[in-house]
Amino acid sequence: METLIAILIGILFAGGVYCLLQRSLVRLVIGIMLIGQAANLLTFAASGLTRKHTAIIKSGAQTLEAPYADPLPQALVLTAIVIGFGFTAFCLALLHRTYKTLGHDDLDKFNTTDTEK
């Protein structure tokens, strides 16, 4: 299971970096999203992947019985998902406004300002 997750993380990072190296703003946003999801998976996988061992103390017990899933990385990933969604929504709104104003999303054509025409 860890090997499959590691391969998936590598694919997401590679796809994200590939998209970041393109000239299009849409691909830039997609690359940021892919790298964010890869980082979330990396954090989640670093905490240890366990099945059917939740971090709940059973009634009558004083401590958790090993092995159990660490709840702190899961909480961090949930927070990162919410922040990433907000950041993506902001980037998409900015992308839409840029495309509506300039009519293109090519990063090489952004070297002039709108007052230089």
Image (cartoon, rainbow, N blue to C red):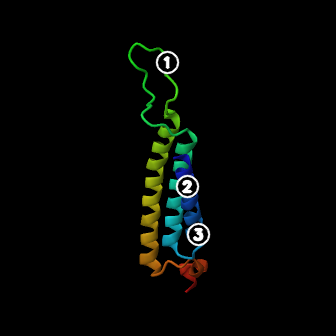
* Residue drawn at point x = 53 percent, y = 75 percent: 24
Q: Is residue 71 above or below residue 94?
A: above
Alpha-carbon span between mark 2 and mark 3: 14 Å
Residue identified by numbered label 2: 9
Q: Residue at x 50, y 77 (%)?
A: 105
Q: What is the distance, in whole Å, between disc 2 and disc 1 at their CAs? A: 33 Å
- The structure residue drawn at horizontal position 51% and vertical position 47%, both measured from the top left corner, is 1
Quadrant containing the C terminus is bottom right
Q: Amino acid at mark 2?
A: Ile
Rendered view: 22 above or below 16: below
Q: Point out residue 67 in the picture as x, y percentages from the top left corner.
A: 52, 29
The label number, if any, that marks residue 18 in the structure image: 3
The crowding category of the residue bearing disc 3, from other C-alpha atoms within 10 Å (few below 14, some 14 to 19, many at least 20), is few
Residue 17 image offset from top left, x and y in percent: 60, 65
Circle 1 sits on which residue?
63
Tell me the mark number nearer the camera, choosing from 3 and 1: 1
Q: Which of 117 and 18 lies nearest the eye of the viewer?
A: 18
- Pointer 2 or 1: first along the chain: 2
Answer few, some or many: residues within 10 Å of disc 1's Cα (few below 14, many 20 plus, some between 14 and 19).
few
Number of the front mark, 2 or 3: 2
**Residue at the spot 52% in from the left edge and 43% down from the top edge:** 44
Lower position in the chain sequence, tag 3 or tag 1 = 3
Amino acid on which the number 3 mark rests in the picture:
Tyr
Residue 102 in the figure: left or right of residue 7: left
